[in-house]
Amino acid sequence: MNIGILKEAKEETRVSVTPDIVDALKKIGAAVFVEKGAGEQSYYHDEDYKKAGANLVSRQDVIGKSNIITSIHLADPATLAKIKPGTIYLGMFQPAMNASTIQKLATKKVEVLSLDAIARITRAQSMDVLSSQATVAGYKAVLLAASHLARFFPMLTTAAGTITPASVLIIGAGVAGLQAIASSRRLGAVVDVFDTRPEVKEQVHSLGGKFVEVEGATHSAAAGGYAVEQTEEYKKRQQEAIDKHAQKADVIITTALIPGKKAPLLITKKIVDNMKSGSVIVDLASSMGGNCEYTKHGQNVITSKGVTVIGHKNLAGSIPADASKMFSKNVLNFLKLLIKDKKINHDLSDEILSSTTIVYKGEVRHKLTLDALGSKSGTAKSKKSVAKK
């Protein structure tokens, strides 16, 4: 059994498998083939992979020799077209947002497994790439905000007088939000937090944040721990509460995402225009349209009122060495489940394997991807084989 690691596109600095994981992959029965230069932007060099026991080869050889291929994002169309039928392709592919590409892979009978669709259960935590990469993004968002803010984060008492601490508003208390709370508090800021889920209140308080409650939020057990769409009435109350807190905030960090959908708009231009000049917004949802109306993905926008709105393209990738190491450990833990007795055991009765399997035996079976395709039967096969996400 061979596992291949592809080099990412130039704009992506991370790599899906780091050298320290190679030996563990060999122990579960795999030979490891790494595309030359795959880890260079993450500061993992070809020599590091070679010392760990990996084979350094061309992209063509990775594709041709591997039973399992890993990358962080979907590879370019030319590469995908060369992947052999029956190959397992593993990564973080945003399948619902890339439904047409997923359909093409299904037609080729490539088995697609996407770790960003993993079930939110305790057993899956060590494989959850969304959580590991959100940890990195939440941390870096605070540093980015601090570097752009026209004020200090901590309270300072000096001979020149006392500086009051910065006020930080964090919207969304998922993994990224919780890391942003912790990092903001370490830097000395006062932190207020919004979330639609009241059950995270205790976690927010444990990190030193103040939880701001807005009554009437919709919850869904079927969402598996992910956020769900809210009612218009709730959105109105939420906007009013956000507007009130935004006016005193020096920094806002937004993290709200709904799987398979455009990010909810939470910070209108009116709210931003009422903020203090010199304030900063870091929008972690920019790749999905953004939580702020001013957000432009991959750009910093400075409004006419002097508020900086940051829509960074890849915050996790801005700390590539550790982000790659965390992603790689997620991949290893998942492969330990997928591979039993040195053989691939694609057991769809396992909740983790079932939830991450987007394409199986030529059929798209992931509900959100099927919805995006406007289909309920994958490649026109029986509905009975379409599994619940």
Image (cartoon, grey):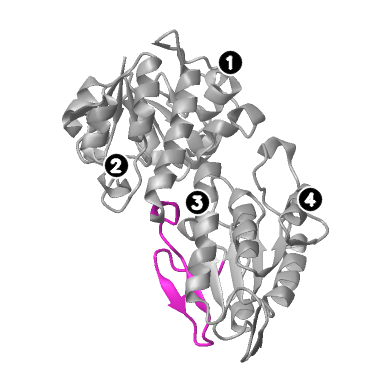
What's the CA distance linking mark 2 and mark 3?
Answer: 18 Å
Q: Residue 380 placed where, x, y %?
A: 45, 24
Q: Nearer the viewer, residue 293 or 381?
A: 293
What's the CA distance linking mark 1 and mark 3?
Answer: 32 Å
- What residue sits right under mark 3 in the picture? 136
Q: Which residues are magenta?
A: 292-317
Residue 144 to residue 138: above or below: below
The picture quadrant where one finds residue 207 is bottom right
> Which amino acid does the dot numbered 2 rest on?
Tyr
| 259 relative position to 194: left or right | left
Q: Mark 1 or 3, which is nearer the eye? A: 3
For marks 1 and 4, the one nearer the N-term is 4
For marks 3 and 4, the one nearer the N-term is 3
What's the CA distance linking mark 2 and mark 4?
Answer: 39 Å
Residue in the picture at 67% in, 39% down: 223
For marks 1 and 2, the one nearer the N-term is 2
- What residue sits right under mark 4 in the picture? 202
> Which amino acid does the dot numbered 3 rest on?
Val
Which SS class for mark 2? Answer: loop
Q: Mark 1 or 2, which is nearer the eye? A: 2
Residue 380 to residue 155: above or below: above
For marks 1 and 3, the one nearer the N-term is 3
- What residue sits right under mark 2 in the picture? 44
> Which amino acid does the dot numbered 1 rest on?
Ser
Which SS class for mark 4? Answer: helix
Q: Are marks 1 and 2 in contact (CB under 8 Å)?
A: no
| 210 relative position to 327: left or right | right
Residue projecting furthest to the bottom:
160
- What residue sits right under mark 1 in the picture? 349
Rendered-image quadrant of the C terminus: top right
For marks 2 and 3, the one nearer the N-term is 2
